Amino acid sequence: MAQQIFVKIPKERVGVLIGVDGGVKEYIQKRLPVTLEIDSATGDVTITLREGVEDPSLLFKAKDVVLAIGRGFSPERAFRLLDGDDMILDIIDLREYVGKSESELTRIRGRIIGREGKARRMIEELSGALVSVYGHTVAIIGDFEQANIAREAVLKLINGAEHSTVYKFLQRKRQEMKMRRFGLWEGGSMKPVSE
């Protein structure tokens, strides 16, 4: 019996998942040993691991790519999840923080996106993660460290932190990340320079 996972994406994202002439669906099926069955009417997606493939993690990788596209990422950005085993998708459901009030959701989405997209752009630039604000969710793609930093920044904005405070936090984290990666690269002897 083939291994399967079922996911549901917003109906308005189905066309993006399929792609022009089925190109996106085809690309996912080419990169991963899975078959996608997409119900355009409901947004239901059945992901089936191909016969003879023993690695169920590939099924979950395909699920993350499908969910990322469903949560507003362009296929090109969602495909970053295929860049290595350390890439993850993290989804924050804003309703857990602000309830179901549409006006509160709109306000919080606005804080996370920022004026002319500045806040979202800063989170992406300084954490190295990709961020999509769509409907009642914020989706994040990055390696574990990048995703964690972006998540923390988003949660600070949800909880009312000033944008400038969040940018300072992000700059500090970026510096720490650089030092750590540089330090590892240099054999770990580097110590962060105190401000």
Image (tube, grey):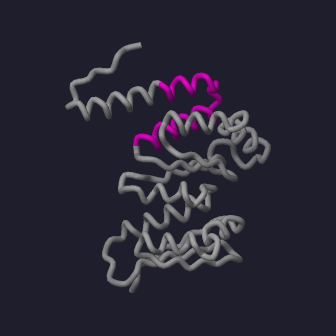
Say if the magenta span includes residue 90: no
**At 23% across and 30% down in the image, what residue appears?**
186
Residue 40 locus on image (x, y percent)? 68, 76
Residue 98 locus on image (x, y percent)? 68, 42
Q: Which residue occupies the extreme bottom position in the image?
A: 1
**At 72% across and 39% down in the image, what residue appears?**
110
Which quarter of the image is occupied by the C terminus?
Answer: top left
Say if the magenta span includes residue 149: yes
Residue 58 locus on image (x, y percent)? 39, 68
Q: Quadrant of residue 163?
A: top right
Foreground of the two, 28 or 13: 28
Foreground of the two, 18 or 167: 18
Residue 77 locus on image (x, y percent)? 54, 54
Residues in magenta, as a range: 145-171
**At 37% across and 84% down in the image, what residue appears?**
51
| 147 lies left or right of 38 | left
Q: Which residue occupies the extreme right position in the image?
A: 103
85 versus 155 height, above or below: below
Q: Main secondary structure of the magenta part?
A: helix
